[in-house]
Image: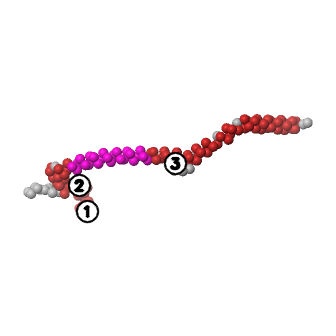
Amino acid sequence: MTRMQDKDDQQQGWLKDKLTRCRRWLYRHRTALILLPGPLIVVWILGTSNKYSIGAYIEHRARMQQVQQSYQYYQERYRSDSLRLNDVRTSVEHIEHIAREQYYMRTPGEEIFLITPQAELADTTAH
C-alpha cells in the first residue's frame, strides 16, 4: 500500500469510530432526546406566538405601571383642584381676586392700569 491509501484508511477509520460513538450515545440517551424537545417546543410556542406570550406579558406590565402612575398623579391633582374650587366658590376674596385679574373688573371709582412689556408695545405700533 502506498502512503496515500494508508492516510485515507486512517481518516475513514477515525470517521467510523466517531460515527459509532455518536450512535451509542444517541441510543443510550434516546429517552432524553424524545422528551426534551417537547417542553422546549411548548415554551417556544407560548413565548413567541400569541397574546399570552412572555413578551406581551412584560409589555402589559410596563403599560400597567404607567397607567397606575398617571392615575395617582391625576387623583392628587383632582383633590387639589377640588379644594381650590371649593375655596373659590365659598370665599369672597377669591372671587374678587379672579374677577380683577382675569376679567379686569374694578370697583366704582377705581382706575386700572395695564402694564405691557416693551416687546409687545413695539409689535402693536408696527402694525
Disc 1 target residue? 126
* Residue type marked 1: Ala
Q: Residue at x 63, y 43 (%)?
A: 38
Q: CA distance from mark 2 to mark 3?
A: 62 Å
Q: Which residue occupies the foreground of this view, 127 or 72?
A: 72
Secondary structure at badge 3 equals loop
Say if residue 115 shows up in the picture. Answer: no
Residue 81 on the magenta segment? yes
Q: Which residue is mark 3?
A: 52
On the rendered image, what quadrant is the N terminus found in? Answer: top right
Q: Position of residue 40 (x, y in %)?
A: 61, 42
State how far apart marks 1 and 2 are (Cα): 12 Å
Identify the residue at horizontal 87%, vertical 38% (top origin).
Answer: 5
Left or right for 60, reference 49? left
- Magenta segment, prevailing SS (helix, strand or loop): helix
Q: Earlier in the sequence, mark 1 or mark 2?
A: 2
In this image, 64 relative to 116: left or right?
A: right
What mark, if any, has residue 118 been given in the picture?
2
Where on the picture, by quarter, is residue 14?
A: top right
Going by the numbered disc 2, the residue's amino acid type is Gln
Q: Residues within 10 Å of mark 1 (few under 14, many from 20)?
A: few
Q: Is residue 19 left or right of residue 92?
A: right
The range drawn in magenta is 63-86
**Labels 2, 3: front one:** 3
Name the image quarter holding the C terminus: bottom left
